Image (cartoon, helix red, strand yellow):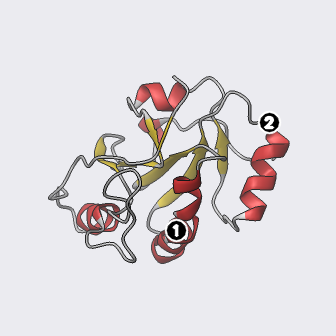
Amino acid sequence: MGAEPQWIDPTKLSRPTVIVLMLADCPIARKFAPEIGRLHSQYKGRVDFYLAISDPDVTAKDAAEFKKAYGFQMPVLRDPGLKLARKYKADKTPTAVLLSKSGKVAYQGWIDDRFPELGKQRPAPTRRELKDALDAVLAGKRPKVAKAPVVGCFLPL
């Protein structure tokens, strides 16, 4: 992983930034990989994206293999001490954190509502809060939804 960053300083952002907190072995988080990649491609050049694997047991090699296996084009951060998870008070994965250019949390929660509760999956989402929040922030507005629930695997806090 070499040159990939290991921390994001929210006071030094040049544009809005999304951090998606993941567990590499969470089946729900893995199902969001295509959508995360699609959003990254759609907003590339306007929003920075990072994937943060918040797991004390994931090595740099594991993170690189995860990135390759799911085709992620964004930097993958290792968060073995769960500093990012604690900073943003995230307890489940995948949790999306959208930081405004000023470093303030503009949105935090699920990527969309495809999994409304554990054990239930919709064929397609009915709400896309992360995308809506990205559009709002890029338009200079506050997202209509600033916080949404996360349905997924518990982080090892």
Question: In the visual, does 134 lie left or right of 25?
Answer: left
Q: Which is nearer the N-term, disc 1 or disc 2?
A: 1
Image location of residue 75, percent across then percent down: 66, 54
Q: Residue at x 36, y 50 (%)?
A: 101
Residue 129 picture quarter: bottom left
State whether residue 70 appears in this view. yes
For mark 2, give the secondary structure: loop
**Residue 56 left/right relative to 92:** right
Query: Total number of numbered labels?
Result: 2
Side of 83 relative to 126 (left or right): right
User: Residue 15, how many percent across, how many down?
Assistant: 42, 56
Which residue corresponds to mark 1?
40
- In depth, the one of 12 and 26 nearer the eye is 26
Give residue 17's position: percent from left, percent from top: 44, 52
- Residue sitting nearer the eye, 51 or 3: 51
Picture coordinates of residue 83, whole percent (x, y): 54, 25
Label 1 vs label 2: CA separation?
24 Å
Query: Please, what secondary structure does the residue beneath circle 1 have?
Result: helix
In this rendering, the answer to whether 5 lies above or below 41 is above
Choose mark 1 or mark 2, whichever is in front. Answer: 2
Residue positioned 33% across, 52% down in the render:
117
Foreground: 43 or 22? 22
Mark 1 burial class by Cα count in 10 Å: few <14, some 14-19, many 20+ = many
Residue at 74% across, 36% down: 58
Residue 59 is marked as 2
**Amino acid identity at mark 1:** His
Q: Residues within 10 Å of mark 2 (few under 14, many from 20)?
A: some
